[in-house]
Every structure is written in structure tokens, then in C-alpha cells.
Image (cartoon, helix red, strand yellow):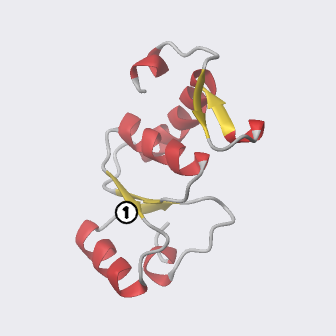
Amino acid sequence: MLPPLADPSDRRALAFGTDPGAALTYRELAEVAGGLAGRLAGRGRVAVWATPSLNTAVGVVAALLAGVPAVPVNPKIGERELGHVVSDAAPEVVLAAPDDELPPPLAALP
């Protein structure tokens, strides 16, 4: 998936379901993930609130492009287990959609 981002085309890279608005071409993915990667560069671990969405895929690709570890976090995880994941992984920042309601261990992160 990442090599085509070096020379992006208008071929479909990602799609979620049948909604045309829930798809990105390689060009769009390179633009969106590349912009986010620039803001993540030099950071430590990045938690990614792993919903089944384009936001999750873009967040993981951005972390990979930035060269920082991505820690996908399952939204169905219990609060106690989430506390352990956050404590063990020690992410610096969390990536989530603007309307995602994050539980306390993640809500405190930028």
C-alpha cells in the first residue's frame, strides 16, 4: 500500500462499504496522510482509536509515513484493559475522528 504513495494515482486505495464518500484514491491518501505525518514526525508512540473507518486507516498510514509507532486501540476494549494498554504503550498523542468520544485514559492525551 505504501509504495504507490510515492507516485500517487487516482486508483482507489481504500474503501469502507459502498458509500462513495468513504473511499480514498492513492493521491487523496498521500495528501491526507502525508499532511498528518508531518505533524506526527518526531513524536513518540501514537495511539490510533481503531474504528472501522477511513480515519483509522489514514492515522495508521500517517504514523508509518512519519516513522513513529502506531498503537491501534480497539474501542470495544474495557476501561481497565485500556488503562494497561495506555500505561504500557505510553502514547504521546491519540488520533481519533473529531466526533469520537474517547474514554478517560485516552481523553487526557493531545
Give the farthest residue toward the bottom: 80
x 63%, y 67%: residue: 100
Which sits in the foreground, 1 or 46? 1
Where is residue 59? Give x, y as percent.
49, 47
Query: Which residue in the protein does label 1 denote?
Result: 92
Q: How crowded is mark 1: few (under 14 residues within 10 Å), some or many (20 or more)?
A: some
Where is residue 89? Give x, y as percent.
27, 66
* Dot 1 amino acid type: Glu
Rendered image quadrant of residue 86: bottom left
x 62%, y 74%: residue: 101
Vertical placement of residue 36 versus 49, above or below? above
Q: Quadrant of the N terminus?
A: top left
Where is residue 71? Give x, y as percent.
35, 58
Which sits in the foreground, 85 or 51? 51
Vertical placement of residue 73 versus 106, above or below? above
x 59%, y 51%: residue: 53
Which sits in the foreground, 9 or 31? 9
Where is residue 110? Give x, y as percent.
50, 66
Give the farthest residue toward the front: 18
